[in-house]
Amino acid sequence: MHISDKVKQMPAYIFSELDRKKKVLKEKGIDVIDLGIGAPDLPTPSYIYDALVKEAKDPENHRYSNYNGCLEFRMAVADFYKKQYDVDLDPETEILTLIGSKEGIVHLIQAVINEGDKVLVPNPGYPVYRMGVHLAGGESVDLLLDQDQGFVPQFHLLSEQHLRDAKLMFLNYPSNPTTATIELATFIEAVSFAKKHHLIVAHDSAYHLVTFGNYQSPSILQVPNAKEYAVEIGSLSKSFNMTGWRIGYIVGNKAVIQALATLKSNLDSSQFLPIQKAAAVALRSDFQSVKANNMIIGARMEKLHAALINIGMQCDKPRGTIFLWAKVPSGFTSLSFTEKLRSEAAIIVTPGTAFGTVGEGYVRFALAVTMERIDETIRRLNRLELGKEIPS
Ligand SMILES: *Cc1c(COP(=O)(O)O)cnc(C)c1O
């Protein structure tokens, strides 16, 4: 059969492979704890699906949406940015509906680079950036994140050579997989780097509302004049437990938004109107559901974090995301520790190498199971024999 080289060269999405291995264990009747995939286990709050049901009953909503997304949703995004970040956005020109941010990320790359152009992608980082660059015929250049520096971008490691033909740079805070969070100063530095090297900076804010304690994650658009260089990609998936709904947005630089809108108007016809309208209700809510969610995730995080420290693993305590990013015990690699957890404890985690070469030596635990399952995870971890491994 005729299959494109681009697709043939795509490795299977790492999470499909994890799923397959999990299925094998389950078929043997083993009680598997899945801390692999990064999707919230909690339900979408009822006020959001109630809005969906109501809107779905209106035949007006069964037609095509405006290509750029329905104005009601874009206005809700604008009002959210004003309220949350004191950032002004024009819903007509500076906001576009996405069918989930994954779609937006892949198409954004195609909208801004030509074949052979370079894109700076965080290493370790969300694998979709790198795959999106591959699909666009571009070249990914590592933007190195170093734990000793708080996983902020190490711009000084990029040479003239790396930056030649570079057009776009991705950032992601609170970060998947590193769980790193930042202050506005990092975005200020990123925007001036983008300005200096004529780059577009795309900030993926998938976890912007998934934070603990008093920490508030900044928006890159809070940097003065950021709109000249930056776009920010948002998603309702993680903050409102809406992964299956496929709803997100991109905001910021007009020219970039217009380019992506042109591309997308030839590919899709935006998202189902009732989904956009229910998402508008979510963004206009008082965020009590988000706070309640964060309390639940935060409690799981605290408990599992303490247990990892207790068995001698190194792991920074995060201020956001639904993950823990832990160093594997000495004598292990990312993969050998992942295998040990699977074969000896029936715990599925993601090897750090799934997120790039710099992920070697780490594993990612997703906090997407109930507290009972976290307790069971801890019991199994405590039974593991660590430190007696032959180095691999
Ligand atoms: C989950 C995730 C996304 C994808 O979100 P969708 O809107 O559901 O496509 C994007 N970026 C990061 C870093 C994520 O972890």
Image (spheres, rainbow, N blue to C red):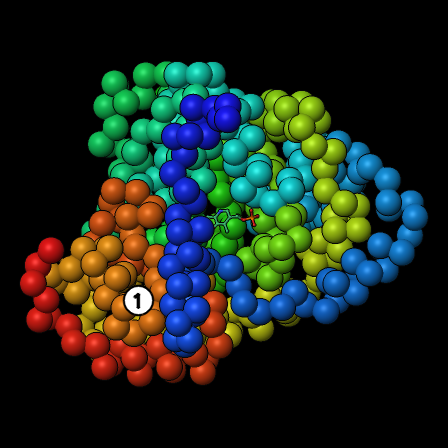
Among the 4 quarters of the image, the one containing residue 19: bottom left
Residue at 25 percent of width and 19 percent of height = 160
Q: Residue 5: where, in percent of width, then height? A: 43, 24
Please state which of residues 247 and 249 is positioned toward the viewer in this rendering: 247
Q: Residue 68: where, in percent of width, then height? A: 73, 33
Residue at 70 percent of width and 32 percent of height = 268
61 relative to 22, above or below: above
Q: Residue furthest front?
A: 1
Residue at 18 percent of width and 55 percent of height = 333
In the rendered view, does 255 fall on the left or right side of 377? right
Please state which of residues 154 and 273 is positioned toward the viewer in this rendering: 273
Residue at 21 percent of width and 58 percent of height = 336
Please state which of residues 342 and 102 is positioned toward the viewer in this rendering: 342
Q: Residues within 10 Å of mark 1 (few under 14, many from 20)?
A: some
Q: Which residue is mark 1?
A: 342
Tag count in the figure? 1
Q: Considering the image in quadrants, where does the C terminus appear?
A: bottom left
Q: Residue 230: where, in percent of width, then height? A: 51, 32
Q: Residue 35: where, in percent of width, then height? A: 40, 65
Q: Is residue 377 visible?
A: yes
Among the 4 quarters of the image, the one containing residue 186: top left
Q: Residue furthest right?
A: 59
Please state which of residues 391 and 327 is positioned toward the viewer in this rendering: 391
- The amino acid beneath tag 1 is Arg
Q: Is residue 226 visible?
A: no
SS label for mark 1: helix
